[in-house]
Amino acid sequence: MKRAWSLLLLALAACAAPQSPAKLFHNGRIYLGHVHGHAPWPSVEALLVRDGRVAAAGSRAELEALAPGCERVDLEGAVALPGLQDAHGHFEGLGAALETVDLRGCASYAELIERVRERAAAVPAGTWLEGRGWDQNLWSPAEFPHHAALSAATPDHPAWLQRVDGHALLANERALQLAGLLREHESEAVGEGGRMLLDGTRRPTGVFIDAACELVQRAVPPPSRATRERRFLLAQSQLLSLGLTAIHDMGIDREGLDILRELRARGALRLRAVEYLSGDGALDAERVRGLPLLDGDLDLLCVVGVKLYADGALGSRGAALLEPYHDDPSHSGLALLDRETLARAVDVCARQGLQPAVHAIGDRANRMVLDTYELQGARDSAFRALRPRVEHAQVVAPEDWSRFESIGAIASMQPTHATSDMPWAPARLGPERILGAYAWRRLVRDPAQLAFGSDFPVESPDPRLGLYAAVTCSRPDGTPAGGFLPDQRLTPTEAFASFTHGAARAARQEDRRGLLLPGYAADLTVFAADPFELGPADWLSLGVRATYVNGEPAFEAP
């Protein structure tokens, strides 16, 4: 079989016109990726790269004969795979998270306050304190906090602290004052899809959910252009060090695009950024017309779609459900867009040739998005080819499981959401609905067609954690034994396919990315050992030796 692969790929390479200098990757095992009809993944001992693309794959002797005198890249016994991709993350958001107070893992409100107080002591009075990552579900009792204790610890600094999912925030008294909110209010409801939690005096507790967050955020000074650039670069360094060669950046504005274009022009962008413009209910053709639709075979920057939001998050009970929450029968979540508004926004995307990517967590939101896509496809024969995306597809009613494939919608999912949410998700949903949650296998016949990511910085961007969660449905410590929703576990090759071929397919780029076949971009993730010869638990400590994008080293371990 290996000899047959060499002959086939050499024949393909002979059709090209090899003129420019080439690189020969050798002295290691090189997996070609999820090639249809071949399981396990085929591998070769050498790869020839020219002009950023794979020119040929086969034995070292065969490829040296094709390109005598080429530059050699010694893998030193390491194992290379098609470059790992994250199909859903927030590029600048990760950089901002690296600069703000890390509140992930806070086991109590007191611990959160202490972390924020330490930052306040290190910066001048009046400086806004930003943080992200708290999760009240980890506390006892598992309830949203009141700002009073936080305000007492940080009297001279306004603070706004995002929940782990980014769909709720906690503000202290100084921030509430600056936002003009420290007064009595008649209702918790804020417009369409927002809640401002009130205490017994009808004053804000400091917790704002979904659309209501804007009431506080509009008082926060916007970051300077220099700050934004720094955050992109910070995030890029971390992502490349984790072996990621490409990300799908879910929600960017025009200035952010301009910054990335400048970084690209001066050679500072080394990560492949697949961009989705931030959208909302006011989306119109003017906002998306004239986007820099850079999408050449080797280009590091492209704009392919628009990110929209149908609902909030499950952890803050903002996900829109068909029936009330199992642990709160008075509440069914928040729809951030109504059907008509969503339909108009999707139609704008379709007319501009842009891929709609709609955040949908709850089963009501997922059904609304699928209904919208189905109707758009019925009146627009070209719509299916855009591969409309459902971001998260986290809770889906059984009647809708088969609709993803019948409509041609991409299920863009994040395995670590399941293992992060499993301590409390069954209580939110109850024993029946949980069967349609994090249901990777139920939504597609071939799991290699899934698009997997992390939703960083909501979760860690480390793809090893996502791969492990996809295969085990367990936390990194191995609990629960056998996995949460064990019937949804993937095989190792299925999981890796979802972080390579599946992610590329989600952006309609599987003809040039996600594999290491001739003509494909030479994006490689190089591991210290062969993940397919290790158990999933060993993946968590599997070292990343190097990350190559277009055949050039973007990261090399010391």
Image (cartoon, helix red, strand yellow):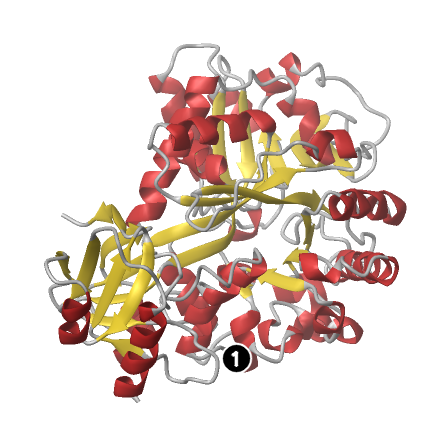
Instruction: Give the vertical position of 342 relative to 506 (above or below).
Output: above
Percent of width and height locating residue 119: 38, 24
Residue drawn where x is 48% and y is 10% of the image: 126
Residue drawn where x is 39% and y is 62% of the image: 519
Residue identifier under label 1: 486
Q: Is residue 200 left or right of residue 359?
A: right
Please say whether residue 474 is visible from this viewpoint.
no
Dot 1, how many residues are within 10 Å of its Cα: few (below 14), some (14-19), or many (20+)?
A: some
Quadrant of the rendered structure where residue 469 is? Answer: bottom left
Residue drawn where x is 29% and y is 68% of the image: 56
Percent of width and height locating residue 350: 76, 48
Percent of width and height locating residue 216: 65, 23
Please say whether residue 252 is visible from this viewpoint.
yes
Quadrant of the rendered structure where residue 397 is? Answer: bottom right
Front residue of 429/515: it is 515
Instruction: Give the vertical position of 434 relative to 5 (above or below).
Output: above
Tally the marks.
1
Location of the N terminus by quadrant is bottom left
Front residue of 19/250: it is 19
Label 1, secondary structure: give it.
helix
Q: Is residue 227 left or right of residue 435?
A: left
Q: Residue furthest bottom?
A: 1
Q: Is residue 427 left or right of residue 36?
A: right
Front residue of 257/3: it is 3
Instruction: Give the vertical position of 71 relative to 13 (above or below).
Output: above
Front residue of 140/392: it is 392
Residue drawn where x is 70% and y is 34% of the image: 288
Q: Amino acid at mark 1?
A: Pro
Percent of width and height locating residue 305: 64, 45
Q: Residue furthest top?
A: 125
Q: Is residue 254 left or right of residue 96?
A: right
